[in-house]
Amino acid sequence: MQMQDVEVFFVDESHFANEPYVRRGWFLIGEKKKVETQKKKESKTIIGALSLKTQRLYRKQADKGNSATFIAFLYQLRQSFPNVLIILIADNSSIHKSKKVENFLKRNPLIKIKLLTPYSPEYNPIERLWLRLKKKVYGNSSYRSVKEVISEIRKIIWHYHKNGLIDSINFNFESYAEIL
């Protein structure tokens, strides 16, 4: 029996907008601060898969995160890894386990989805990537359009892949090694 190549990915979606991403702040008692916002709210969803082997991020941008866009992302992964068993570790989001996704998986037996325990984002390293990405992208910046936000995300991911981030995004994948 021949051993089949396997790729394991941690999958999740994150939403980005041209609105300010205020985490916390301070100001003098009695003094009110106003955060400037754009008149037209724009947003995008990025579906991402973080490779267990290479720690590379594969992504797809979409207007909305739904079953159809998730299936399009799965198809994109399938094209990048033909004839390889793809195992996706995902949260319990409805788009990961919808009827449409189940039907897609039946037609594509080389893609498997393993769901994490509900309400356990700490087990999915891509959650930390999204958090770090949002801190770096939004930091002390505001954007006129979601196109500017996506452009900044692309730059940061490019630097991440080139190991060029000043403060890198580090994951300890050792506890997942037995999956391979």
Image (cartoon, grey):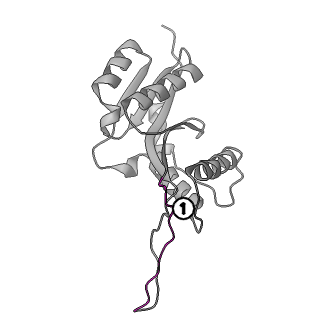
Residue nearer the viewer, 80 or 19: 19
Rendered view: 75 above or below 180: above
Image vertical order of residue 47 relative to residue 79, above or below: below
Residue 113 drawn at (x, y percent): 37, 28
Q: Residue at x 42, y 31 (%)?
A: 70
Task: Identify the amino acid type marked 1.
Answer: Lys
Return the residue at label 1: 135
Judge from the rendering whether residue 9 lies leftward or rightward of residue 114; answer left or right.
right
Q: Position of residue 120 (x, y in %)?
A: 32, 49
Image height of 154 relative to 58, above or below: below
At x 44%, y 27%, the residue is: 87
Q: Residues within 10 Å of mark 1 (few under 14, many from 20)?
A: some
Q: Which residues are magenta?
A: 30-41
Q: Residue furthest bottom?
A: 29
Instruction: In the displayed orientation, state which residue is furthest to the top.
Output: 1
Rendered residue at 53%/26% (across/down): 77
Q: Image quadrant of residue 117?
A: top left
Instruction: Provide residue 17's location: percent of width, then percent of height.
Output: 49, 53
In depth, the one of 32 and 2 nearer the eye is 32
Q: Main secondary structure of the magenta part?
A: loop
Question: What residue occupies the far front of the structure in this picture?
Answer: 39
Asked if residue 178 lies in the magenta stretch, the reply is no
